[in-house]
Amino acid sequence: MSNEELIAFLKKNAISVGCVIVSILIGLAIYYRSDLLPEAEKVLAARTGQGELLAANIEDSAQLKEQHAAITAANDAIENRVIRVGQLAENYQYFYRLESDTNTKLTSVRQVPLPPPVRNAPKTNYVAVPFSFAAQGDYGQLLDLLRKLESGEHYCRIMTCNLRPMSTDIRGGQLAMSLNVEILALP
């Protein structure tokens, strides 16, 4: 086959020859780019994950201002109910107000020293300040004192409570109660 016959053949079958050449070029491109396919799939998966995260963030941000306001209000409510560790006089005043509100008699009130901080412990925003006190009164008064401690103006956890009669005649007599409590405080 001579050059002239080849050119005549190409002119006669131009579409078929063009399709064969394009098919060969596509096959070569696929062969040389096939090693990039796993990396491209990783990039696609990463970008799909980022897109889903952004879509979830956009969906969740619809009520973000209201949620921020609610959290801020809750934090303010907590801040109003905690005591301060260094304000010892104000902390004692809380117990004396309880004494006058419940008509009990406090015989001793003391703030127990805080335990030393634990090494490598996660930092917290609040600490529990331990208090130990003793009160005297009748059964109803002491129960009222416990209720006011439990649902009072500060967050309080009763650790121990011991109740005993003041005398051998327990009918209608006075009772003595000793308590160990923890009150939530800012350091």
Image (cartoon, helix red, strand yellow):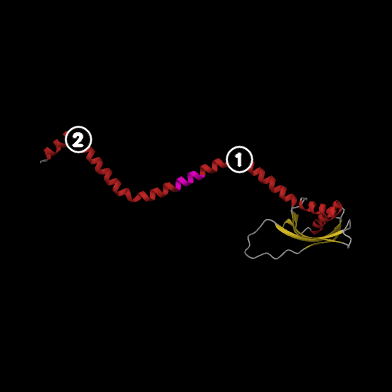
Q: Residue at x 42, y 46 (%)?
A: 44
Most extreme residue toward the left, as rendered? 1
| Mark 1 → mark 2, Cα distance in angstroms | 64 Å
Q: Which residue is mark 1?
A: 63
Residue 110 placement: quadrant: bottom right
Instruction: Please say whether residue 49 is one of the residues in the magenta stretch.
Output: yes
Q: Residue at x 32, y 49 (%)?
A: 34
Residue 128 in percent (x, y) is at: 72, 58
Q: Which residue is mark 2?
A: 14
Q: Residues within 10 Å of mark 2 (few under 14, many from 20)?
A: few
Q: Amino acid at mark 2?
A: Ala
Q: Residue at x 67, y 46 (%)?
A: 72
Residue 161 placement: quadrant: bottom right
Q: Residue at x 49, y 44 (%)?
A: 52
Instruction: Please say whether residue 164 is one of the residues in the magenta stretch.
Output: no
On screen, residue 101 above or below 115: above
User: Which stretch did the figure color magenta?
Assistant: 46-53
At mark 2, the secondary structure is helix
Q: Amino acid at mark 1?
A: Gln
Residue 9 in percent (x, y) is at: 14, 36
Asked if residue 187 can be seen in this view, the reply is no
Q: Quadrant of the C terminus?
A: bottom right
On screen, residue 184 above or below 56: below
Residues tagged 1 and 2 counted as in contact (Cβ below 8 A): no
